[in-house]
Amino acid sequence: MAEEFFIQGNEACAKGAIAAGCRFFAGYPITPSTEVAETLARELPKVGGSFVQMEDEIASAGAIIGGSWGGTKSMTATSGPGISLMQENIGYAFMTETPIVIVDVQRGSPSTAQPTMAAQGDMMQARWGSHGDYEPIALSPSSVQEFFDFTIKAFNLAEKYRVPVFVMADEVIGHMREKIVVEDDIEIVPRKRPEKTENYLPFENIENGTTPMPAFGDGFNIHVTGLTHDERGYPDTNDPETHDKLIQRICDKILNNKDDICSVQSENCEDADIVIVSYGAPVRSVVEAVNRTDKKVGYVKLDTPWPFPDEEVAKLTANAKDVLVVEMNLGQMYYEVDRVCKRNSNVHLMGVIGGLLPTPDEILDQINRLGGN
Amino acid sequence: MRTEIRICGFGGQGVILAGIILGKSASLFDEKEAVQTQSYGPEARGGASKCEVVISDTKVDYPKVQSPDILVAMSNEALIKYIVDLKDEGTLIVDPGTTDVEDVKEFIEEHNIKVYEAPATKTATDEIGLKIVANIVMVGAITKITGVISKDAAIKAIEASVPKGTEKKNVSAFEAGYNLL
């Protein structure tokens, strides 16, 4: 039977992680994500899992990569200052195709800035934070229920595509309390282990652009490295073809499966003069503004900012004269929306910093300024 | 209908728990929608503490309180700081043991505020013998005065929220608050 809880977003995230099969958390608690770590420190041992408080975030990211290669679904949670430190190991996880989940409850930034205030300043760090070419997946929850659901989805996508997945929340969603419903038939993607065949190759393209991953101790003789490697995992750093083949596959396994990965929600877009694009907590204010205005305004909510849902956003904004991007930074996803929409529409930014969620009234002011019917 | 409630006091009085109980009552036991938020500052104890709850018959989109319909003040500092946002003809509930409505008399008159005095701290101390349940006494008073949550839902939410073994004391505190006005 479905169960109901009235809990914080961060607690819902921890609950979602356990439901998804996460049994290892390594992290360095930081506001406003601390309750994720607190809850998992209490709950993981009860289900046979482990919690380790690490010395810093670099080590935290390293530990969950190790946990994942040990055969255990693994996660960390942090905020801006921590996500900065994790970037080197995040790149290693992309290169070694290690499924991990990284939760970022975003706060005022840059540097340590505003620990207890909300922001969405890390969106481009999720996209480009580590060096080189790779394609991340990121999910942005707009409610406590979605923080639960998207954490589960993050684990499922991580396993399916052998890739790090970000859950890009914010202080508002992390700290507020709402009802969540936990169904008893949650869809979980279990870790696929490879068959022990004579010619098993750990970095081959046989399924979703990748291949099932063995755990350390399973008895496979494989090599895991951040250096450019062939399908066996052996370093081959001077052959352009090996590098091209590897990086193309790591990118294509995401880009060729965007239909499966990307998700948007929308309302009233077909005949709207103005379409508002938003994600995370600001969606709450956008929806209220759209419901209150008597103009023809629709909205698009990006469930998955990364990979950016080009096709869906282009289709939903095709008839709009103006497109307004509402986000809690001075313009990050705005540039993606502009890239996709500028041929058909004028693209505007409502970038809000300072820590407070934009209000429906402030968004209505922007709508009125843009005119339209 | 959307009702915005702000409960404030000083850190340690349990105003956050009071708000959580209101939200839990509405969303889990009254079949309404509710969102609870709170101010986070670097302080752990003392200082002004604020908890906000939005309760609605329909989905709550914007989760924060903009101008409360109901303000509950458990300290004078918080009363003075937060009364300015209260809606015209809004409801003000204060603990007369820890606040002085004379300090905000002008605002009350200008904005036609309905004022209720619920001596939560005194009731908690004298009737329950435990000063720390003043917040639950206040939940009782809020329930009776505003009707924003039902009595049954409030009791269920209290039993689900307080530490095991303290349910009886807390429900008595709620009843004492409910019977104050």
Image (spheres, rainbow, N blue to C red):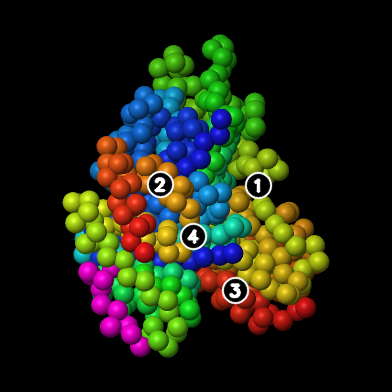
Is label 4 on the same chain as label 3? no
A276 or A224: nearer the viewer: A276
Q: Which residues are magenta?
A: B95-106
Alpha carbons under labels 2 and 4: distance apart: 14 Å
A173 or B91: nearer the viewer: B91
When the figure is inspected, residue A188 is found, relative to residue B167, above or below; the finding is: above
- Residue depth check, mark 1 versus mark 2: number of the one nearer the observer: 2
Query: Callout 2: residue from which chain?
Result: B
Dots 3 and 1: beta carbons under 8 Å? no
Alpha carbons under labels 2 and 3: distance apart: 39 Å
- Residue at point 43% right, 64% down? B145
Expressed as whole percent of the image width and height from the top left, the position of residue B95 reads 28, 68
- Amino acid residing under circle 2: Ile
Q: Dot 2 surroundings within 10 Å: few (below 14), some, or many (20 or more)?
A: many
- Residue depth check, mark 2 versus mark 3: number of the one nearer the observer: 2
Residue B148's disc number: 4
Alpha carbons under labels 3 and 1: distance apart: 26 Å
The residue that disc 3 covers is: A363
- Residue at point 24% right, 59% down? B123
- Residue at point 40% right, 66% down? B6
Expressed as whole percent of the image width and height from the top left, the position of residue A328 reads 50, 66
- Residue depth check, mark 4 versus mark 3: number of the one nearer the observer: 4
Is label 1 on the same chain as label 4? no
Alpha carbons under labels 4 and 3: distance apart: 29 Å
Dots 2 and 3: beta carbons under 8 Å? no
Q: Dot 4 surroundings within 10 Å: few (below 14), some, or many (20 or more)?
A: some
The residue that disc 1 covers is: A262
- Amino acid residing under circle 3: Ile
The residue that disc 2 covers is: B155
Residue A46's disc number: none
Which structural element holds mark 2?
Answer: helix
Query: Callout 4: residue from which chain?
Result: B
